[in-house]
Image (cartoon, grey):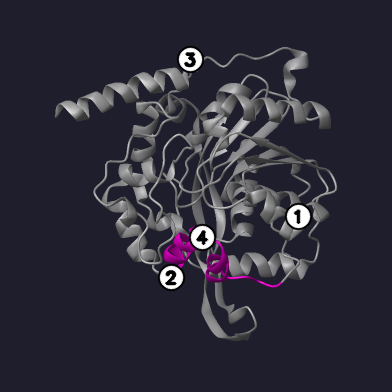
Amino acid sequence: MQGSGLTRLILFTVLSVILVGVHAFDPRAYDAERGKEATCDAVKRTGTLSRTDGWGLFKSREKFVVEKEEIVTTQIRYIDINPTAEKTILMVHGWPGMWSTWAYQIEEFKNDFRLIVPNLRGFGNSTLTGNARSSGTLQDLVSDMACILKHAGVDQVICMGHDWGSQICYEMGRSRPDITSAVVGVPIPYVPAARSFVPPAFHAKFIRRFMYQVFFDEHSDKAAAELDTDIRRSLRAFYRSLKRPLPDGFLKKRDTVLGPFGSKEILPIIYLTPEEEDYLVEQFEIQGFKNTLYLYATENRYQSWKLSHDQGNHTITQPVLTVYPTKDLVVNWKLIAFVLRSSKYIPNLTTETIPGDHLPHMESPDAFNAVVRKWMSKVGVLGSEEKGRVTDEL
């Protein structure tokens, strides 16, 4: 190793100790000792996506028609912590996440709540069965969550989600209020399906850093191949922080995602320990990125919208906390929530803002955890600390 590289490694190690502090999380130990798998029914769909000429701002119209459905099974891996606690939090990761990205929240809440922390289908050891582009709707993922809760013997949860996980939790609150007592979403607001379907390419016309979603949608094989070339480098690019500037073209290209970095070194993830980063890389090496990009497929997005839209019940009646970062590189989510009129559909909504980019629960975990605890106390969903804390030895 050259001197400059060694110097950077030493500086990163010192900085990690300063930033992470006493944070010591062993994902492999949790996986080995708390990991479980549920066999869940899933719907395998095939169909046709059509694009027709539109009008005005909508130059094209997308519509997915399901031609065949069959029931298959999938294996969903989850971590089960403190199973004797009175109340349960379901923690749902986003992209490109794994269960272990909730480390700071696991450490914070593990003695007061039962924690069910899954890998979404297609991530890590959770399998993806069927046509990925059309068999991974928000409703499919809610069904997976309901399946693992049944497997764990849990009747009702507080659903806490990040990124796509927040959308899963909002949908779970909307469509399955029987198993969802409250919802926490970060950093993305509720996107009600009351209006017309809007494809990813339309969003990208106005929000340039949504263009990577078009790349993931229209060229998923090419995108997966690029990301799989160096999984560690890919993860480091997306686990960004306000403390580190990024290339101006990052997330703005329709034909590449990592191209703007060139050959520039991408430093380790600043809010993960080296062991946590290694584990995250190992988990993505199991299936690669291809089986995770279904989240961005127009086929799945259209079906998610259509089912919710046709049902017509867009209101989430449970208590909801949405936590925004001070400066998400991609977009101002508070502004998006205003445009979408998200609060109209959530009568019991609390919003908070904490320092960070797209992952404030990892960048500013103390602030995030404090906000969540305060909100829990306010709406009456605190865990079992009133009866005495149960200490988890991990």
Residue 60 placement (x, y as % from top left): 57, 81
Contact between labelled residues 2 and 1, with CB atoms less than 8 Å apart: no
Q: CA distance from mark 1 to mark 2?
A: 28 Å
Q: Determine the secondary structure under disc 2.
A: helix
Which region of the structure is painted magenta? Answer: 196-217
Q: Residue at x 39, y 68 (%)?
A: 219
Q: Residue at x 82, y 29 (%)?
A: 378
Label of residue 342 in the image: 1
**Left or right: 374 in relation to 13:** right
Q: CA distance from mark 2 to mark 4?
A: 13 Å
Overall secondary structure of the magenta stretch? helix
Tell me if I can see residue 208 in this picture.
yes
Front-lying residue, 157 or 68: 157
**Left or right: 15 in relation to 10:** right
Residue 204 part of the magenta segment: yes
Q: Residues within 10 Å of mark 1 (few under 14, many from 20)?
A: some
User: What residue is disc 4 on?
Assistant: 210
Residue 315 placement (x, y as % from top left): 81, 55
Looking at the image, is mark 1 or mark 2 nearer the viewer? Answer: 1
Residue that sits furthest to the left in the current view: 2
**Left or right: 284 in relation to 322:** left
Label of residue 22 in the image: 3
Q: Amino acid at mark 1?
A: Ser
Residue 22 placement (x, y as % from top left): 48, 15
Contact between labelled residues 1 and 4, with CB atoms less than 8 Å apart: no
